[in-house]
Image (tube, grey):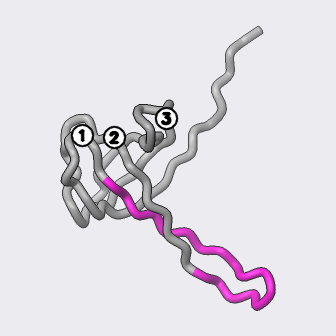
Amino acid sequence: MTNVRAKRKERIGYVTSDKMQKTIVVRVEMAARHPAYKKIIKKYNKFKVHDENNTAKIGDRVRIMETRPLSKDKYWRLIEVLK
């Protein structure tokens, strides 16, 4: 029996806070269609993300990946700073 890991989720978003040590808050935009009116609505989620080297700053566009739980609220880690 082989252990096959499921593909981990990736998101792209913008850093909204970098005040914590080794943690950033990333806002991710998602588009969803309203079930009754069929209009596309923007929805936003905020994730606490592990930033090991404190490289990301406020306003940076970043790529994040799902990971094991690192704390009560942190389930994501920083992959790269895009811009």
**Image coordinates for residue 31, horizontal then vertical, percent:** 59, 74
Split into 4 quadrants, where in the image is the C terminus?
A: bottom left
Alpha-carbon distance for marks 1 and 3?
15 Å
Q: Amino acid at mark 1?
A: Lys
> Which residue shows up at 49% across the image and 63% down it?
45
In this picture, residue 61 sits left or right of residue 69: left
Q: Secondary structure at mark 3?
A: loop
In this picture, residue 70 sits left or right of residue 60: right
**Image coordinates for residue 54, horizontal then vertical, percent:** 19, 43
Alpha-carbon distance for marks 2 and 1?
6 Å
- Report if the CB atoms under discs 2 and 1 are less than 8 Å apart: yes
Nearer to us in this view, 48 or 72: 72
Q: Earlier in the sequence, mark 2 or mark 1?
A: 1
The answer to which image quadrant residue 34 occupies is bottom right
Split into 4 quadrants, where in the image is the N terminus?
A: top right
Q: Does the stretch in magenta take in 47?
A: no
> Which residue shows up at 22% across the image and 54% down it?
18
In this picture, residue 59 sits left or right of residue 76: left
Which residue reaches farthest right? 36
- Report if the CB atoms under discs 3 and 2 are less than 8 Å apart: yes
- The residue labelled by disc 1 is 22
**Image coordinates for residue 26, horizontal then vertical, percent:** 37, 58
Q: Which mark is residue 67?
A: 3
Pointer 1 local density, CA inside 10 Å: few below 14, some 14–19, many at least 20: some
Q: Earlier in the sequence, mark 1 or mark 3?
A: 1
Span shown in magenta: 25-41
- The residue labelled by disc 2 is 50
Q: Earlier in the sequence, mark 3 or mark 2?
A: 2
